[in-house]
Amino acid sequence: MSQQISSDIVSRITRVLGKPTTPIQLHEPEFRGNEWNYLKECLDTGWVSTVGKFVDRFEKNLSEATQTKFAVAAVNGTAALQVAFRVVGVEQNDEVLMPALTFIATANAASYLGAIPHFVDVDRKTLGVDPSKLEQHLGKIAELKNRQCFNRNTGRRIKALAVMHTFGHPADLDRILEICNRYSLELVEDAAEALGSEYNGKHVGQHGRIATLSFNGNKVVTTGGGGALITNDGTLAARAKHLTTTAREKHTWEFRHDEIGYNFRMPNINAALGCAQLEKLPQFLNEKRALAKRYVEAFADCKVAKAINQPSNSKSNFWFNAIEVTNSTLELRDQILADTNKAGFATRPVWVLMHHLVMYKDNPRADLTVSEQLERSIINLPSSPVLGRALT
Ligand SMILES: *Cc1c(COP(=O)(O)O)cnc(C)c1O
């Protein structure tokens, strides 16, 4: 039985990608634009480190690409998220609501500030925070005192909600923001996977007071390693820039710092790579969307699995394509993973849920039924832009 399911899935992936001669990776970076030129310029001029024109240019290009007023480059997406939580006011012992279905960075970034991740469930269609279940959960556990939200069970303040746009599919931001406003929660968007994704015609990252991006090697565009904060709030942007650059006061020669900041600056050499990569973003997005369309078609009449499509009202960047296996178990999932990898397709499961990890097993949490089903049933498929090239 599981053998049959597995071979059906392998044959449908083969229909899209062809029979591999060498293994097809999950997400490969591609450097066929101005990367060499810009990197050479860094080396030739000596500007390789934490100051240089490419950092400013990358920030400007990023705010254009995301339709936001401000972008602050950072050393990676996790660091950016830590600063995002800090600038919206998350403090030690605060709780931060976030999906259990996310990459570890979301939870760790809150923990670095001494805050406590509090896990909520996701919606099966968006794979992001489920507003209805969030509302139900808050109705049970939250109370407002002096316009601040508290967890009745723990007595701790709940300061913020982080949404994560899973695989680039935007969460249901309008409804989530409405709930945040009602409960006095700061909304932060972990948009690490969602560069280029739109919700109701607007680039993601603008419902939250601040949002973060990642430019790790497997993201849609890469700087080697890197991240950024994006926001329309000038005060938050200035605060984020100050904190990520050691909180140094502006002065020609004096080193005076007015608080304990971080060295979270993105080096110029990484920003140079990012500038070249961003030039290719529109092309990468076209190719990724064309590939996603093909996966959806190939699985349209499949009884054992379906390709996860973008939510209505959204345009996903389809960072990672995924299928959801019907009524899956961990055993079935692992069988499919083994068989697809053996056939030359690099597939992988979704992250182990946060409350299944030793560090977070006792954290506060809501009912997580959907996340737990998805943990057993999601399989990511090869998603590099090059795979969609011939389809555009
Ligand atoms: C990639 C990613 C990050 C940031 O990762 P870094 O490697 O630190 O850049 C954060 N959140 C999510 C959901 C991610 O996928």
Image (cartoon, grey):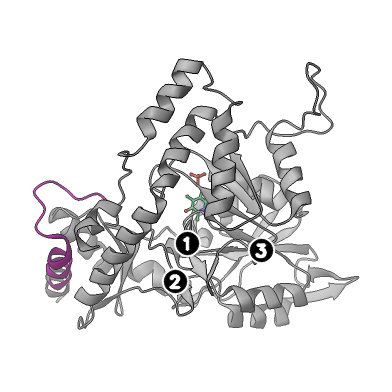
Q: To which residue does mark 3 refer? A: 208
Give the CA separation, mark 3 to mark 1: 23 Å
Q: Are marks 3 and 2 in contact (CB under 8 Å)?
A: no
Q: Quadrant of the N terminus?
A: bottom left
Which mark is first along the chain, 1 or 2? Answer: 1
Which mark is first along the chain, 2 or 3? Answer: 3
Q: Does the beta carbon at disc 3 come under 8 Å from ligand 1?
A: no
Other residues around mark 2 within 10 Å, as few (<14) / some (14–19) / many (≥20) = some
Relative vertical location of residue 16 with respect to residue 195 in this rendering, above or below: below
Q: To which residue does mark 1 refer? A: 353
Local secondary structure at mark 2: helix
Q: Are marks 2 and 1 in contact (CB under 8 Å)?
A: yes
Q: Does the beta carbon at disc 2 come under 8 Å from ligand 1?
A: no
State the residue in front, 361 or 211. 211
Image quadrant assignment for residue 256: top right
Amino acid at dot 3: Gly
Left or right relative to 325: residue 266: right
Image quadrant assignment for residue 373: bottom left
Q: Does the beta carbon at disc 1 come under 8 Å from ligand 1?
A: no
Residue 389 in view in this figure: yes
Q: Are marks 3 and 1 in contact (CB under 8 Å)?
A: no
Task: Read off the magenta span.
Answer: 8-25
Residue 304 rendering spot, x and y as whole percentages:
22, 79
Residue 124 rendering spot, x and y as whole percentages:
44, 77
In the image, which is nearer the foreground, mark 3 or mark 2?
3
State the residue in front, 266 or 80. 266
Q: To which residue does mark 2 refer? A: 372
Verify whether residue 17 appears in magenta: yes
Which mark is first along the chain, 1 or 3? Answer: 3
Local secondary structure at mark 1: loop
Amino acid at dot 1: Leu
